Image (tube, helix red, strand yellow):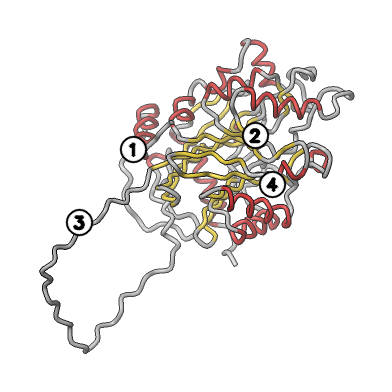
Amino acid sequence: MRYLTRNLIIGLTCLLLSACQPAQASTPATVFPTLPPPKGVFVLGQPTATSPPTHTPRPTNSPIPKVTPSQTPTNPPTSTTEPEITLLFSGQIVPARCVQAGVDAHGNADYIYAEVSHLLQAADLTIGTLNAALSDASPMTGCIKTFVLVGSSLNADAMAAAGFDAMSVATNHIKNCNSNTCGNQAFLDTLANLQRVGIRPIGAGENLESALQPVVLEVQGVRFAFVSLGEIERSAFAGENTPGIAPLNEPNLRQAIAAARQAGDVVIVMPHWGPEYSPNPNWNQRTYAQIAVDAGADLVVGNHTHVVQAMQYLHGVPVFYGLGNFVFDQTWDRKNQQSVLLVVHFEGTRFEGYEFIPVYADGDGTVHLADGAEAEAIIARIQAASTALPPPP
């Protein structure tokens, strides 16, 4: 079982970027509670910052009661230390078009994750979002402008080698195929290729019932139950008797969370939602986030928008609306090449904080750690979008 402490991940990235300075305590922002990031590399979450302040009772004139010493020795307290568990989430992964052309040129997809695989492998659980089909039954498109997003099965092998344990697949391009005769073959191949390498697909199945089922991964006795639902592409939706993804609507969201609540100790919701290229979550996203929290989610991590989005706490529950493009070929705007790795810390079932690790991807998909001004700009966009959010209801 992989294990990662907060000190280890900070040390690794500081060593790589040579840009870390000690964080100094300050008053966290209202909607984006953080400590100051060292050179824009990390943002350390402070989940208690938005909690209501506690009030010290006023002194009274009541006499202080006397305490009579006991002759019976008091037993020392029993240690109740909870296990420290780290989860890592990436932005969306689209190993298609020019990225797949790079895979073809290299003969494998391992190069994509080479610079960050040590971080992916160090977390106890690493979870991505796949927004392309992985099927050798479909012809590859080559490096051209097309909305057909499909990659070869080699990408699944590289994801597993890089350290991914699970993959949200309730995404809008997951049924893509570069042929009119594919039907559901490319989609079913995608699920099979992920399972073949030991990556658990989240949010899809042979029918709607199976697509809504949670994926439960256990770490040090704590069961993390993941569900994923998507709202973008109706043709990808599962039906009563047809394969596909879990459609994002209120009844499905509540049903999926209820099942996850029964199956796990910590419920994590991964919606695929939101307007493309906007850092600001729209009304739908904010509404579904509130529904998820009301229904019992402990953590919400969304994706789809191709750029980093805001984060906030809703009644104490952390909501990350979008992490950006982790792997894609959208080089026409630098913001579309940038994303963050989200590192989330738990002590047992209790959320303890988070960090962002800013990264960017080349046109062939190669992921690099961002540093200096670029890292600061990525973090600043998240903070600006977070500050602009309306207050939660």
- Of tags 1 and 3, the one toward the viewer is 3
Q: Which residue is mark 4?
A: 273
- Of tags 4 and 2, the one toward the viewer is 2
The residue positioned farthest toward the right in the image shown: 180
Quadrant housing the C terminus: bottom right
The amino acid sitting under disc 3 is: Pro
Residue 184 in the image: above or below residue 310: above
Q: For the residues marked 1 and 2, what is the alpha-carbon distance in whole angstroms?
A: 30 Å
Q: Secondary structure at mark 4?
A: loop
Q: For the residues marked 3 and 4, what is the alpha-carbon distance in whole angstroms?
A: 51 Å
The amino acid sitting under disc 2 is: Pro
The amino acid sitting under disc 1 is: Asn
Q: Secondary structure at mark 1?
A: helix
Q: Earlier in the sequence, mark 4 or mark 2?
A: 2
- Of tags 1 and 2, the one toward the viewer is 2
Quick one: label 4, few (<14), some, or many (20+) residues within 10 Å? many
Q: Which residue is mark 1?
A: 7
